[in-house]
Amino acid sequence: DGQASLAMADLDHGLQLHPDDVDLLLLRARLSVKTKEIPAAIADLDAAARAAPAAANQRLAIGLAYSSLAEFKQQVTVLDRAIAEFDQWLKYHPDDLAVPEASTGTSLSALLKLLRSPASTTGWSASYRAKKARAWLRRVCSPLSSKCAPTILSVLRVLPSTAFLVANLTPVKSKARS
């Protein structure tokens, strides 16, 4: 698309002038995802992660961007990076309004990593990993769980590789106390 090419040229020029600008790196990574240039998106996210200050709010955006790549190549690698960015952000922002989003991102990324890790790295068969994922989901969806469960379930339902996990699983509503 012509607009994407123009935007990419502008971002390239901006990054020539300011190679460590985290916001420009994030924008270029998002544009690379839209144009299906996944290795370029990962490279820009890696550069943004290196350039971002430890307590930067951009760490949440970097984590979300990494986790959005989970359906593409290098799934486990980008999920590891997403978890690291979410954890880094949570460390410095424990009272932020976006904590549920970051917690959901961490939980979902960890679950997807569990499901997609090859048996050779975990020692677990695909069916055993699915069984562990279902047990984890039941715990997340329990009455005492976080408010993140509905978000996690909605994401898992639309991903072709995980829809089978939540086919018959719904969050358990907590009982009203008397």
Image: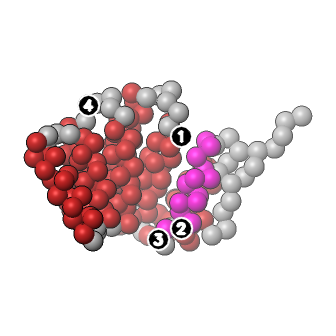
- Asked if disc 2 and disc 3 are in contact, CB closer than 8 Å, the reply is no
The answer to whether residue 117 shows anywhere in this view is no
**Residue type highlighted by circle 2:** Val
Residue with the mark numbered 3: 161
Q: Earlier in the sequence, mark 3 or mark 4?
A: 4
Q: CA distance from mark 1 to mark 4?
A: 22 Å
Residue with the mark numbered 2: 158
- Under circle 4, the secondary element is loop
The percent position of residue 36, horizontal first and vertical second, equals 28, 68
Range of the magenta residues? 146-159
145 in relation to 135, above or below: above
Picture disc at residue 100: 1
Q: Quadrant of the N terminus?
A: bottom left
Look at 21% across and 61% down and name the residue there: 6
| Circle 3 crowding by C-alpha within 10 Å: few under 14, some 14–19, many from 20 | few
- Asked if disc 3 and disc 4 are in contact, CB closer than 8 Å, the reply is no
Q: Nearer the viewer, residue 113 or 73?
A: 73
- Asked if disc 1 and disc 3 are in contact, CB closer than 8 Å, the reply is no
Residue with the mark numbered 4: 53
Frontmost of labels 3 and 4 is 4
Q: Is residue 99 left or right of residue 154?
A: left
**Residue type highlighted by circle 3:** Ser
